[in-house]
Amino acid sequence: MQVSVGKSTLELVQGDITQQDTEAIVNAANSSLLGGGGVDGAIHRAGGPQILEECRKIGGCPPGEARITSGGGLKAKYVIHTVGPIYRGGRRGEAGILASAYRSSLELASQRGIRSVAFPSISTGAYGYPIELAAPIALQTAMDYLQAHSEIEMVRFVLFGSSAYEAYEKALKGLLQSESAG
């Protein structure tokens, strides 16, 4: 699914984030930045030891912020590492931290002149954020950013599996409907 947001494009695809040919891919990292499971482990394995070496020099990243390294052996030139919240019921600022993780990643892309970015669904794996709650936050944050920042030409959400894709598609359709109604 693809939609225009200002002068930019936002798209949803089902696939493997490590195979994306965007200028940057976003890693759903842990705060150590030293690799882990899920998307984080897959990116470190596919990109090779260069990414881990660069992450060691950075020294970590707090939740809601982002850091950047090269793409190592990936198609993407850069990896933007961001740390989402661990979901603990939604009453501990998780939504704000999640939005900040997406916004910080996009701000870093803008600062570096990166025009295309691929995101996974941050915090919805091991960190337990319910995807039906996370998807609207992710999409709205990206759409708001693209409205104000046309230097990023394309944001792609790369969703692993059909249920993740369907959750994002449903959320995007809901946001577009409420936008056109408002």
Image (cartoon, rainbow, N blue to C red):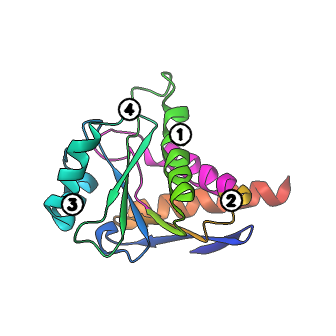
* Residue 170 lies in quadrant: bottom right
**Which of pointers 4 and 2 lies earlier in the amino acid sequence?**
4
**Which of pointers 1 and 3 lies earlier in the amino acid sequence?**
3
Q: Is residue 105 left or right of residue 7?
A: left
Residue depth check, mark 3 versus mark 4: number of the one nearer the observer: 4
**Which of pointers 3 and 2 lies earlier in the amino acid sequence?**
3
Q: CA distance from mark 4 to mark 2?
A: 25 Å
Q: Is residue 34 above or below residue 116?
A: above
Residue 149 is labelled as 2
Residue 100 is labelled as 1
Q: CA distance from mark 3 to mark 4?
A: 21 Å
Q: Is residue 28 above or below residue 155?
A: above
Q: Amino acid at mark 4?
A: Pro
Q: Secondary structure at mark 1?
A: helix
Residue bounds of the magenta highlight: 119-145
Q: Amino acid at mark 1?
A: Ser
Q: Is residue 36 left or right of residue 153?
A: left
Q: CA distance from mark 1 to mark 2?
A: 16 Å
| Residue bearing mark 4 | 62
> What residue is at 52 percent from the left and 45 percent from the top?
104
**Which of pointers 3 and 4 lies earlier in the amino acid sequence?**
3
Q: Secondary structure at mark 2?
A: loop
* Residue 178 lies in quadrant: bottom right
**Which of pointers 1 and 2 lies earlier in the amino acid sequence?**
1
Q: Secondary structure at mark 3?
A: helix
Residue depth check, mark 3 versus mark 2: number of the one nearer the observer: 2
Residue depth check, mark 1 versus mark 2: number of the one nearer the observer: 2
Judge the density around disc 1: few (<14), some (14-19), many (≥20) Cα neighbours within 10 Å: many
Q: Are marks 1 and 2 in contact (CB under 8 Å)?
A: no
Q: CA distance from mark 3 to mark 2?
A: 30 Å
